[in-house]
Amino acid sequence: MVTKDEVIEQYEIEPMDKADNVDLSEDDLDNGSKGQLIKRAGQLRDRRNELNQMASERASKRDDLNAKTREKVDEAQEHRENRDELNEQVQEHKDKRNELNAEANELFDEVEELKQDMELGSGKSIEELKEEIEDLEFRQQTEVLDADDERELIEKIDEKREELAEKKEKVDDTSELDELVDEAEEVRSEASQHHQKVTELADKAQEHHNQMIEAYREADDIRDEADEMHELFVEAQEAADRHHEDFVRVQKRLRELDKEEERERKDERAEKREEEKEEAEEIYQKFKEGETLDTEDLMKLQKTGLL
């Protein structure tokens, strides 16, 4: 099982150093000055962007690995289909081989039956009979025999000659047998050809099976790497999201501070206007009482609309 560290090293992934992450406490948020918060917002934004870039790179590599996994699965499926197709052909050739072997066996059984009918399989062969006749004739020519022994020898020679003649006659009439033997051997040869195809196709089917197993194994390995890469992506993305949320919180706090400052400025302006109004009314009262006003007093009266 592959580990995150192995994936980081193999695919040259930049590891996420948590020491580079930016923290934001509630105290920082509630009590930090505007300047401090602006600085912290910039730090959070920059780190967020770095983490988003890191997450994007990891997501891209994860997607590449998932694509390679799919390629390996497709490759394995192709080998599976080829294997199954070849196995179907193997079974077809097996069926044909078995059918032809059964047919050949029947034909050879017919050959044996025909031989038995012709008695070719029993008794002595033509060559054996010829040798026996030659031996008997040689004995007749070289040995001195009385009349009974010579007559007996001549009768035996005649019997052998008759047996030889019958055997030759049967052999001369074996065209049907020869045709049957040729047919049986031809069928057996065709069966052997199908058996050869069974062997060849079975070997190819086994090759595709082995390649299928290997492709599935590689797909599993790459899928494990993709899963680890996804975990690395989630790690970076979650950190980026946390920095973004903190950045948003700081921005919200800064807007609140801006509103507070604006309210303070409004209050100051209102207070100043009230003070100016009171001062102008005092000046106006003096004017009504006949006191002489200088230019600055007149301008204050004009500003407040009392003149």
Image: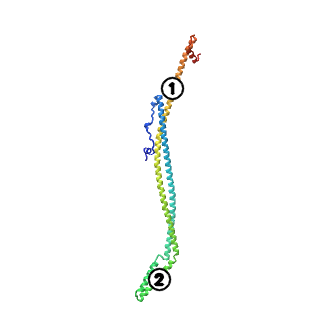
- Disc 1 + disc 2, Cβ < 8 Å: no
Residue 276 location, x and y as percent?
54, 18
What kind of element bears circle 1?
helix
Its colouring scheme is rainbow
User: Against 114, is 7 above or below?
Assistant: above
Crowding at mark 2 (Cα within 10 Å: few <14, some 14-19, many 20+): some
Q: Mark 1 or mark 2: which comes first in sequence? A: 2
Tell me which amino acid carries mark 1: Glu
Q: Nearer the viewer, mark 1 or mark 2?
A: 1
Residue identified by numbered label 2 = 161
Q: Quadrant of the C terminus?
A: top right
Residue 187 location, x and y as percent?
51, 68
What kind of element bears circle 2?
helix
Q: Residue at x 45, y 84 (%)?
A: 157
Residue 188 location, x and y as percent?
50, 68
Q: Residue at x 45, y 78 (%)?
A: 127
Q: CA distance from mark 1 to mark 2?
A: 144 Å
User: Against 54, is 292 above or below?
Assistant: above
Residue situated in front as seen by the camera: 123 or 87: 87
Number of disc labels: 2
Rendering quarter of residue 8: top left
Mark yes or no: residue 272 visible: yes
Residue identified by numbered label 1 = 261
Residue situated in front as seen by the camera: 112 or 187: 187
Tell me which amino acid carries mark 2: Arg
User: Against 14, is 95 above or below?
Assistant: below
Residue 301 location, x and y as percent?
57, 16
Direction left: furthest residue: 144
Numbered mark located on residue 33 in the image: none
Q: Residue at x 50, y 65 (%)?
A: 193
User: Against 53, is 124 above or below?
Assistant: below
